[in-house]
Amino acid sequence: MIRTFKIDKSHAGIISESTLFKVLRYLDKEKIETPFLLIDTSIVREKISMIGQYIKNSKVFYAVKANPDVEILRFINELKLGFEIASEGELEMLSELKVKPERIISSNPVKSFKFLKIAASYGIKYFSYDSAEEVDKLARFIPGCNVYIRLSVPNEGSEWPLSKKFGVELDEALELLSYAKKKKLKPVGITFHVGSQCTNIYNWNIALDKAKLLWDKAKKKGIRLSLLNIGGGYPIRYTKNVIDIETIEKNINRLIYEKFPENVEIYIEPGRAVIGDAGIFVATVIGKAKRGDEDWLYIDVGVFNGLMESVGGIKYNYIVEKSKHTGNKKLWTITGPSCDSFDVIDSNVALPEPDINNLVLILSSGAYTVSYASEFNGFSIPETILI
Amino acid sequence: MIKFFEKAPYVPVEYAYDVEEILYKGKSKFQEIMVIRNPYYGKMLLLDNVVQITERDEFFYHEMLTHIAMHSHPDPKKAVVIGGGDGGVVREVLKHKTIEKVYFVEIDEEVINISRRFFPNVASGIDDPRVEIKIMDGAEFIRKRKASDIDAVIVDSTDIIGFARTLFTTDFFASIKNCLTDKGMFVTHTESLHFHKDMVIEIQEVLKKVFPIVDLYTANIVTYPGNWWAFAVASKNLSPREIRREVKIKTKYYSDEIHTQAFMPKGMYDKLMQRKLKW
């Protein structure tokens, strides 16, 4: 069965023609059962070849939380990327893939006992922290491990800010570096996170300025650092163009070159930037309704089974299957399948009117979608399929 | 004078053509069909508002889609033309004296009728006794063929991501391989190296899963946005770069010189496939 979709220039800037071609070819199959997430592996490969390319002496660790599908991890593992993890569950998947401990780090500043024990026995050596309590925990379970302190930096201009929950200011950071040394851990570096989907290039400038201050203060105290973990934050295109990786990295590289010793090692932890725009959700229109003067569109993926980030303000671009109404666009409130009124994905979305049972493609939905999904109300977690 | 604006999602430019006259406008089961007259290009055939051929320059595309595959075959007797309802490729195939049979497989009969009516010089070969017209999906025709007796399969389709995409699947390419003789050649267009480079690479990759020999040549087609049009050619044994018969046919653009020069230099081809050509 050949399905036709209403594709226009606004889509062309978000999804490449070859990815769309692969998606459509997949949808031509006889039987498909929505919702599911398609991942174009050639985009993943391309993004991985790009990230870190312009930053000297850098290593890339995929933030597993963005999408922990085992086939994705297998694919990324074959491309020899490292992994950044936070929990025993994530470690278990990597251990199934026999990922060497040298290629795994954990940048979750607050880790559970259970995870620490398993990480110790697996041989993971790099951890972030931002409290004295965490130093005590690390010293107890993984004595002598390498630690990097999480510095608090501004997250303005990132669409998914992270700084409140984690990170410390300069003075406390300095004390914590000393404390780690005292507890016989190896304080090797500094980390920060500018916020996920960061479209403000100056966040990296401010973060690196701050890291430089701490770096020098530590040196005066006799703590020689060697590692700078710049976290993630590279943005992807959801509905509009964003600054590209090359521009961000060239800026970062220039700043590092200006401020830090030449042999400083750089870790990068992209999640969204690796997997986000490789993903296309395929959903089905299950209902339409007029509520007052609003047009509502009900689809079988929603806030609870994949599109949680929409609540935080992420807006997606949609492609709808052609129907007899395709000529005129309407403004839709798009909502998921559950009985919860919180399950609203977006409003005022201009789309041609689909028929019930038509497909809807949701672009750039590879990251922080299925990894957030629950089975609330009995709607199953969408399958991830690599194409 | 009114203008026709050609719009396509994956094309960053928009061509505008003066329209002297709208000669035909209609809708078939599959697409919108329009014939307009432009002062420079003459009559133009539009499918779903995308330019397919013009009287003035159609030969560039038709000759280049046809004669590379045909001349790299030592003795082509049976050919299959899929799509190309205007008849241009059929006309070119019939120029080869060795040809005994052409299966002309077009899904949309309306396009053939319109071409007969408005483009008689393009449709000139359609009624040749060697031609058998099949109104059906080309993918289905190829899939149902049991014998391996075809010397050349030529696909002349509309946009790849439109309903023509059944003509670009691994299954389709595998069925083509089955129906080709050991010396058989397959050729299809894969859009522009400027605007659709990722598609050009993608189709090469899909073809390589099926055929041992896959190659790429290009021609400049002025009315196709991106102009630098890429053709994918594949075979079981024979390199399409070699001309295996003396070029005796009458053409306006294609020649033995053009045949050898049309192929992408090997080094550049490798770079393209490694995605190292950045533009």
Image (cartoon, coloured by chain):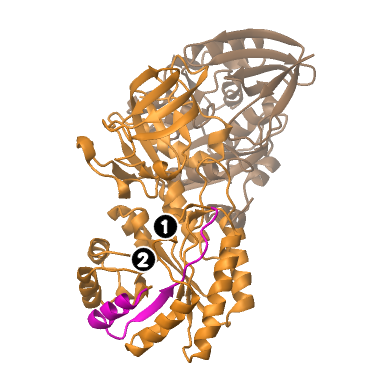
**Nearer to the camera, B191 or B145:** B191
Asked whether residue A100 is drawn in magenta, I would say no
* Residue located beneath label 1 in the image: A271
Report how far apart the C-alphas of labels 2 and 1 lie in the structure: 9 Å
Label 2: chain? Answer: A
Q: Which residues are magenta?
A: A131-157
Amino acid carrying label 2: it is Glu
Note whether A158 is above or below B71 in the view shown.
below
Image location of residue A332, percent across then percent down: 45, 25
Check residue A156 in the rendering and tell me which mark sits there, or answer none. none
Q: Quadrant of the N terminus of chain B?
A: top right
Furthest residue in direction bottom, as rendered:
A222
Q: Quadrant of residue B54?
A: top right
Residue at x-position 52% and y-position 46%: A237
* Residue located beneath label 2 in the image: A84
Image location of residue B222, percent across then percent down: 71, 32
Contact, mark 2 vs mark 1 (Cβ under 8 Å): yes
Q: Colour of chain A?
A: orange
